[in-house]
Amino acid sequence: MAARTPAEPARIPVRVQDVTAYRGDALVVNLFEGVTEPGGATGAVDKALGGAIGALIRRKEMTGKVGEATPLHTFGRLPASRVLVVGLGKKEQFDLEGVRAVMGEALRFLRRTGASSAGTILHGAGAGGLDPAAVAQAVTEGAILGCYRFDRYKKPEKDRKVLEELSILTREAAGRRALEDAVGRARVVAEAVTLARDLVNTPPNDLTPAALAAAAAAAAKASGFSCRILAREQMRRLGMGALLGVAQGSANPPRLIVLRHRGGRQGKPVVAFVGKGVTFDTGGISLKPAENMESMKGDMSGGAAVIGAVSALARLKAKVHVLGVIPAVENMPSGTASRPGDILRTMSGKTIEVINTDAEGRLILADALTYARQQGAPRLVDVATLTGACVVALGTIRSGAFANDEGWMAAVREASEAAGEKVWQLPMDEEYGELIKSDVAEIKNTGGRKGGAITAAKFLAHFVEKTPWVHLDIAGTFESDKEKGYRVKGGTGVAVRTLVEIGLRLAR
């Protein structure tokens, strides 16, 4: 794999100064919907511009609606070359996710205009009533994630526009340290998301199971956590028949990637993150349709999220012992591939009848979850692009969530909400389990079209037994087909921020 692109903007300093004194290419201020007279920092800028913002509001050329961005040249009336007034929408609906979104949109807009430096106020920390440190974190995440681009396979642009610096402006000197700490944490988390995005966007000829393992090892070396790679023979000795059954059709051998951040804590891990790592999924013998198959390079998004999250927790020196397990395989059709009708014996000893070789993610997770349990993890979260059925149920807005323990589900949900990654819990009624009973083995790997996301989760439940567990199905959220807010086209890096938040909360 090629070297990673540095995060942009490279510098995010916190400056204690009046907003009207900022000197740079652009200054970002805001307007809530329904405001008729700008106040606060926007009011001060309006006054310096001779009432230009107020005049645009009165002419209804500026409304404050979400997504609105109005540039104004200052012509020397301010040290900044131009002002960008961004709409925040209704004040009562504005939150930290809104901060991330507005910063992503604003900075892409400014980059297109050639700005290399910008200053911003803390959107929502005044009239919006949001905590300033939390806003600084959201500003930083939105800026880095919104400026992300994956262009390593393109010729370098002759006049490539880069936003080099974003200054966060505050008038409160006493709170500067808290803002700087928040910015530092946010940079680590955002860079972990960009690491995951890079992996998801890398083409499958470059990101084989071995290459994914090498990327995890490189992240471990850079961030200071341990990485152990198990090869085929080691997995065979462990009895991982389900994982190896999926891998046997490919010329690229499988890997089991085992990550560990001890955080100064010895003994058993307090949580295990398990991520699906299918580096390309053709469906195997149950071949997928050719249309959109190229997106199946992202079938390792769960594994990428785990690598990113463990990397962030290590860089943050979180005092928590976290285990990461990523089964990495390629699902290919060949003369050696597993067939519908095969019976596989898992590491747990349970047998599985293969009905559809395209239901492969749950097979590799079965052995990975068993491995995580045997390492002593008392609670589990798995992340997987598992089912098209989840996309049908929830679309691309929320990831599906399934659990065997409501207390642990509540903790994961709270972490996801704090991180700004939406999930929705689906049911796990016992009756759904009837659909995956097999006549010739203990279970089968698919229960048909009806309730497909749920029966996939019921399948995984066989391998966690009574260990508290949450399954996140990110099939609908792992990629984006358009630019919006801080999301850009391609891999989203979804679940990294949720897993990091879980780890930080367990550390506390």
Image (cartoon, rainbow, N blue to C red):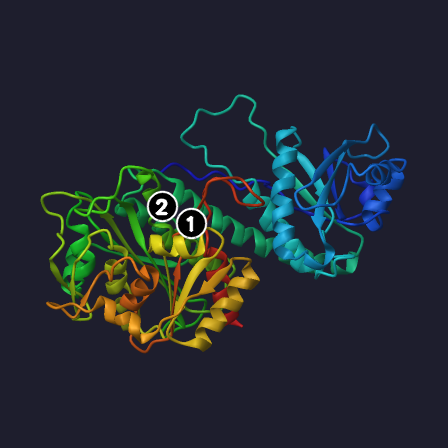
Q: Mark 2 points at which residue?
A: 298
x, y percentage for residue 357? 20, 52
- Quarter of the image for the C terminus: give it: bottom right
The quadrant where residue 447 appears:
bottom left
Does residue 464 appear in this view? no
Q: Which amino acid does label 2 sit on?
A: Gly
Q: Mark 1 points at which residue?
A: 478
> Which of the pair 229/124 is nearer the observer?
124
Alpha carbons under labels 2 and 1: distance apart: 7 Å
Left or right, 78 with respect to 152, comes to right
Residue nearest the observer in this picture, 128 or 175? 128
- Report the quarter where the N terminus lies: top left
From the top left corner, tell me how far across and down residue 379 is, in percent.
38, 73
Q: Residue 216, position in %: x, y?
A: 35, 51
6 in relation to 313, above or below: above
Q: Is 236 rendered above or below residue 13?
A: below
| Mark 2 vs 1: CB contact within 8 A | yes
Which picture quadrant has residue 67? top right
